[in-house]
Image (tube, grey):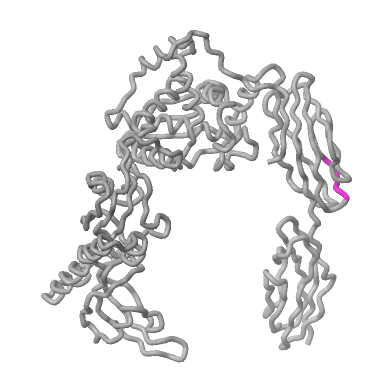
Amino acid sequence: MPAKKKVNERGTYTIKSKQSKQKSRLRQIIIIAVTVVVVAALGLVGWSIYNSQAPFNEPAFVINGVTYDMGYYIETLKSYYGKVPSQNLSGYESYGDQEIEQFAGYVEEQIIRNHIIILGSKALGIEVDRSIVEAELKEAGIEVTDEYVDIIMAQKLLEQQVPATQPQVHVQAILAENEAAGLRAKARLEAGEDFEEVATEVSRFPGADVYSNDFGWLTQREADLKAGSEKFGEIIFSAETGVITGPVYDESVTKKFGYWVMKVVERREATEDTSAAIKLKGILAGSWQEAEDIIEQLNAGADMDELAKELSQYPGAAENGADVGWLYESQATGDKAFLFTLEVDEISRPISDDLVTTKGGYWVFKVLERDDNRELTSEQQNTLIEDLLARLEAVLQNEPDYNVENLLTDEKRIFAIDQVVLAQGKGSVFIRDASLPSGIAGREYEYKLEVYGTKKGNTWSITEGNLPTGLSLDSKTGLISGVPAYAGGASFTIEVNNGIHYWSQEMFIQIRFPVSIKTEALPDARVGEEYAVTLEALAESETVTWEIIEGSLPEGLELDTTTGKISGTPVATGTSTITIQAKDAYTMDSKTLTLNVVD
């Protein structure tokens, strides 16, 4: 983002000077509340855009049937303004190029997020007494507003459900495909073999490439999240420290391994272009024993499609049955090569596959260390808050009357940001534009700069650098206009000043070279003879696309829109007039040409 300089100071809170631990604590809560990092993409999108002036009493949000107006949004913006580090705004580029626009988007999501925390926690029976928060604000000499109360309540609920210090264990773990493999892994570890070496050979944990065998320090909930399990946390927290434990079965965990039971239903012989192929039906099982049980049921006459709908872990099996498609012999590696030895309708033995994922596995692990009150890292805290938000939102979405509507439009956001800037002091002003649209050499350019905050009495000037030749800045209106003479880029600093405050900002404008069709005429074509002519253009970008925007080519000829080549064999004499358009990434040009077809 370009460097910026602002003269006026941002507003700060004034707190009455009553000395007490309670006031100090409350100040800390407020600071934490307004600087906490948004870690969850809440999936609350689809916001409408329309143009209207937005007074304070217009609706901004509807959350669970309660309407929060523009005044609520604006006061929340003011509460957060100046207290949110710029790095917290990463990911909010969709709200605009300027930091203040991204900040406004951040606060929008904070408002929704805070109410999800409050409402979702209440649905789980976890509440903070609103009157207590109000009393604490009064005692600290802070004005009691809905905005402050909601911010602090949400933060208190977060602290309550994601404490900064929690019991944690440091664990190494292997996920074995079956009990026998787990027992063998445990024996090797007890014999002194390296944990990582054994894990590399044995573990079927899908995230092994990310986490290796050492899962690090984990809370119980974090253990389940990292392992993709509903039981892993409980398993490791109930184990003895320093002891190799397992194998312990976990039916909820996902492993990267499975066994197929298959049969061939159709064959294709090899051709010059493709290898032999077989059409397969299959059932994907999580273990060898499950696969053996499936084979037994099939041999007893069970329908393979119906059994697949009931038991197969292959995606889509519940709807599509046992159909898994065609397998070419050239692609059949490992155990799958065996399938080409089967007769049609013959049931296979269990076939291993380490490219699929299935449920159920056996944990072999060692708790290296234990700490009953270990501080969370920022990464751990973010992970657990994100998980909490997702769970709270899921709880609310199950309620039939729950709703979240963001009614903010571009115009409403502009109005709100104006109020925040104006709140910083008389005359406060802020350039709204972070960048300028590109222009085209030799063509009219016009762009009006806008501001947030004070709208009247502003004058504009360029304090460093120059506009491209041919362009000028109107000092009263902020209008940049003219006809740029040359292609190229220009950097300069623009300042808006109203005699009280000013804002200066570095900017850049790119003047593009216009695409220009070079082809002046088309050679004649002859009936029955091959014709080929490639249109030519000068352009700034490498890629030029072509189109006929008026008229049509003679019958038998066509235009390749990517190369500009006109080719084919005309079938009749005549004259065609066409208008060709060439378009690059930035500009376009058109030209009318005539093509004669002669004998």
Left or right position of 324 against 303? right
Q: Position of residue 473 (x, y in %)?
A: 84, 36
Residue appearing at x 81%, y 62% in the figure: 516
Instruction: Compare residues 213 and 524 and report the one nearer the observer.
Output: 213
Magenta stretch holds residue 484 = yes
Left or right position of 283 against 418? left
Q: In this view, does 330 lie above or below 586?
A: below
Image quadrant assignment for residue 103: top right
- Location of the C terminus by quadrant is bottom right
Tell me where the magenta segment starts and ends, as one range: 481-485
Q: Where is residue 464 in the image (x, y as percent from the top left)?
A: 84, 36
Q: Main secondary structure of the magenta part?
A: loop
From this viewpoint, is residue 177 visible?
Answer: no
- Location of the N terminus by quadrant is top right
From this viewpoint, is residue 189 visible?
Answer: yes
Q: Position of residue 507 (x, y in %)?
A: 76, 40
Residue appearing at x 71%, y 32% in the figure: 431
- The outermost residue toward the bottom is 272
